[in-house]
Amino acid sequence: MRAALTCLRVILVIALVLILGLQGLTIYSLATTEYSVVPLACTVALLCAGTVLFYAWPARRYIGVILCAAAAVAFVFIAVDLYHTFPETIQAYGSQGLTVGKTIWRHGSPVLIPLLMLPVMILENKLDLHAQIKQAKQAAQAEPYDPILEGNAGLRPEQVFPDKKAKRQIGIRIRK
């Protein structure tokens, strides 16, 4: 389980770096056009903030996932807007413009970040739970037991009185 978690974390970081690089290039290339880069820059900042909160605040990982999911939804809207704004082919130069494949690769890929965060969060929660259970078992085993203080010839109370009914009957006999 730890190996899967490590692989998912590495894939998440690699995907984030690639996506940030693609979006940075997009912002740079759109700066020369009349298209506003403010929404794209804000969603990139939101994606970065969500990822930083996901790793910096392990007790509240879901906040980072929610921020990244909101950024992913915004990226989908921006991708649709960019696809409708820029043509698929540019006739004057004969080059290819923004196709559906390029739109999905460049502007739809940020959806992967929250989708990768969910299994990472689930695996980390499982590992945390296993660690807590293991720690509780170790604390219970490390608890000292002194048979001299108990006065039952070295037997634990559950060994002397296996059930409550037998214990009650012995208590009644002693009182008589």
Image (cartoon, rainbow, N blue to C red):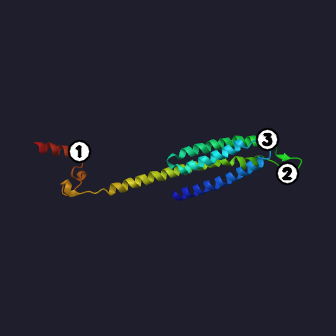
Given the current orientation, which residue lies at the most extreme left position?
Answer: 176
- Kindly report the distance in space between the C-alpha atoms of the residues bearing marks 2 and 1: 87 Å
Query: Dot 3: what SS?
Result: helix
Q: Amino acid at mark 1?
A: Lys
Residue 37 figure quarter: top right
- Regarding residue 71, the answer to whether it shows in the image is yes
Query: Dot 1: what SS?
Result: helix
The residue shown at (16%, 44%) is 171
Among numbered discs 3 and 2, the one appearing first in the sequence: 3
The residue shown at (73%, 41%) is 80
Query: Dot 2: what SS?
Result: strand
The residue shown at (22%, 57%) is 147
> Can you give x and y, in whole percent of width and height, for residue 35 in the image?
77, 42
- Kindly report the distance in space between the C-alpha atoms of the residues bearing marks 3 and 1: 79 Å
Q: Which residue is mark 1?
A: 164
Q: Amino acid at mark 2?
A: Ser
Q: Which residue is mark 3?
A: 85
Among numbered discs 3 and 1, the one appearing first in the sequence: 3
> Can you give x and y, in whole percent of width and height, for residue 1 in the image?
51, 56
